[in-house]
Image (cartoon, helix red, strand yellow):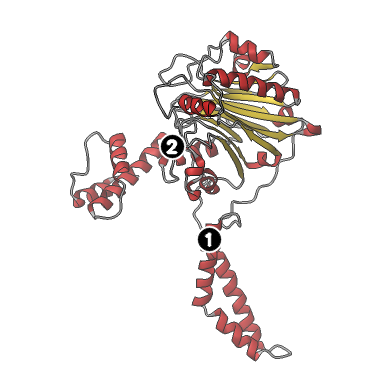
């Protein structure tokens, strides 16, 4: 992926192979690092595999990304009304808008079965861009919680006996027709779970005025298999014929998101996509204290109150009120100055410590990831030997990825000695 130029919107389509159910999972950090290091503006996700309303509020996506970006807006489409749904629910899609692109957000929508979702972004003179991400089920009727079985069950509840794959295409073409009729410029991508470069599919999209975006950009190149171990291009992007992009393509399996599918990316000029190029906005440095983060606000107030009590601000203010004279005396002036200094220091201290920031300042590299994992592994092993809180599954996973032999047989002294020898 090339370095992003100015006045460029970078859009990625990605089969996520599941978003973690917990904010503490290490995959979250890898997703954050990829988004920040590659300056992604729009991430269109498929196969999210999460039933979001069953996830604890503090573990949901918007809560996780508060630490990642100053401004972002995400929406997900999944099967809300399945009585058999658990937190892990196969399928579903989502779109994440990051940074300045959120100013163009106008509307979002989704399918009731979680098969596709979309956002509308506004441009010049009423020009609208609609970005759609989709996930088509595969036929595997024997698995009760597969996407196919979920959709089959919900369709039958509505007295609809169609095959979920047939229903997907019939319903999608109707939706696509309405989007085209609205006059929007469309970018449609996702996991089609079939050859998305087949003549039949390309011609069908062509009848709606959409072209195979990446194939048109690289006409002499063969489209690669987009799933690890697969043989077909099942992930693809189609867009309105009037749109063009400067750069784009498929990333290698090891170069994109932590997934078994390739990342599809496209760089559009803002002028081509929205009709004009806006002046760059001078963004402020990310703040730890924001009013839309109740936990940060609560911590900030607690720290500030503690600081005020430590310096006896209430008692000093009461004394000042009782001794205040007109004209104000020199001693009272000094006391006022002292109270103002204490308050200023308290505000700065509370804001500096109300939450930690994780903004991906350092680019991801395999070496940095390995070093981080080594440090984490040795810390966990030492905690385990000391009888402190630890995560056994995480220890086994890190041990397996870094060292072939198990290390938990070592003594505490041996572990601490080996840790000190490591030169990071």
Task: Give the residue at the far right of this rendering.
Answer: 125
Closer to the camera, 229 or 402?
A: 229
Q: How many marks?
A: 2
Depth-wise, is mark 1 or mark 2 nearer the camera?
A: 2
Question: On screen, 324 above or below 263?
Answer: below
Q: What residue is drawn where x is 23% and y is 50%?
A: 417
Q: Is residue 142 left or right of residue 327?
A: left
Question: On screen, 155 above or below 87?
Answer: above
Q: Which mark is residue 150?
A: none
Density class for disc 1 (Cα within 10 Å; few <14, some 14-19, many ≥20) is some
Closer to the camera, 209 or 289?
A: 209
Q: What residue is drawn where x is 68% and y is 25%?
A: 186
Q: Which residue is mark 2?
A: 88
Q: How many angstroms separate mark 1 from mark 2 (CA)?
A: 36 Å
Where is the N terminus found, in terms of image quarters? top right
Q: Note whether residue 361 is visible.
A: no
Determine whether the residue tagged by mark 2 lies in a helix, strand or loop: loop
- Between disc 1 and disc 2, whose residue precedes? 2
Q: Is residue 237 left or right of residue 52?
A: right
Q: What residue is drawn where x is 49% and y is 50%?
A: 58
- Mark 2 and mark 1 in contact (Cβ < 8 Å)? no
Q: Quadrant of residue 388?
A: bottom left
- Give x and y (percent) for residue 182: 75, 26
Q: Which residue is mark 1?
A: 352
Density class for disc 2 (Cα within 10 Å; few <14, some 14-19, many ≥20) is some
Determine whether the residue tagged by mark 1 lies in a helix, strand or loop: helix
- Give x and y (percent) for residue 329: 68, 89
- Give x and y (percent) for residue 223: 53, 14
Closer to the camera, 174 or 195?
A: 174
Task: Give the residue at the far front of this rendering.
Answer: 159
Q: Quadrant of residue 201?
A: top right
């Amino acid at each position: 992926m090339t370095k992003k130029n100015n006045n460029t919107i970078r859009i990625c389509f990605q089969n996520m192979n599941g978003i973690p159910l917990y904010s503490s999972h290490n995959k979250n950090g890898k997703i954050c690092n990829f988004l920040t290091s590659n300056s992604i503006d729009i991430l269109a996700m498929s196969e999210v595999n999460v039933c979001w309303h069953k996830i604890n509020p503090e573990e949901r996506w918007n809560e996780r990304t508060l630490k990642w970006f100053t401004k972002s807006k995400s929406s997900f489409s999944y099967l809300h009304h399945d009585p058999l749904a658990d937190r892990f629910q196969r399928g579903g899609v989502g779109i994440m808008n990051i940074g300045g692109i959120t100013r163009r957000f106008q509307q979002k929508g989704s399918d009731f079965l979680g098969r596709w979702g979309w956002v509308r972004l506004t441009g010049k003179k009423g020009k609208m861009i609609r970005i759609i991400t989709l996930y088509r089920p595969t036929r595997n009727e024997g698995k009760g919680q597969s996407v196919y079985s979920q959709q089959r069950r919900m369709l039958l509840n509505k007295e609809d006996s169609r095959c979920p794959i047939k229903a997907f295409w019939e319903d999608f073409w109707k939706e696509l027709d309405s989007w085209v009729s609205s006059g929007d410029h469309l970018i449609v991508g996702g996991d089609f779970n079939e050859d998305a470069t087949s003549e039949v599919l390309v011609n069908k999209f062509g009848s709606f005025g959409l072209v195979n975006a990446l194939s048109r950009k690289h006409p002499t190149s063969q489209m690669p298999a987009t799933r690890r171990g697969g043989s077909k291009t099942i992930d693809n992007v189609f867009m309105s014929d009037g749109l063009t992009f400067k750069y784009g393509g498929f990333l290698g399996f090891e170069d994109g998101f932590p997934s078994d599918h390739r990342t599809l990316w496209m760089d559009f000029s803002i002028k081509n996509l929205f009709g004009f190029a806006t002046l760059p906005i001078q963004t402020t440095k990310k703040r730890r204290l924001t009013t839309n983060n109740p936990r940060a606000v609560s911590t900030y107030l607690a720290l500030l109150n503690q600081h005020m009590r430590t310096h006896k601000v209430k008692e000093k203010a009461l004394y000042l009120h009782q001794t205040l004279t007109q004209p104000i005396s020199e001693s009272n002036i000094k006391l006022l100055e002292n109270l103002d200094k204490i308050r200023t220091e308290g505000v700065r201290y509370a804001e500096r410590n109300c939450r930690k920031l994780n903004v991906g300042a350092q680019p991801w590299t395999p070496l940095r990831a390995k070093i981080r994992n080594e440090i984490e592994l040795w810390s966990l092993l030492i905690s385990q030997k000391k009888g402190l809180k630890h995560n056994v599954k995480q220890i086994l996973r890190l041990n397996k990825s870094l060292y072939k032999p198990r290390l938990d047989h070592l003594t505490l002294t041996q572990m601490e000695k080996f840790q000190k020898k490591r030169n990071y």
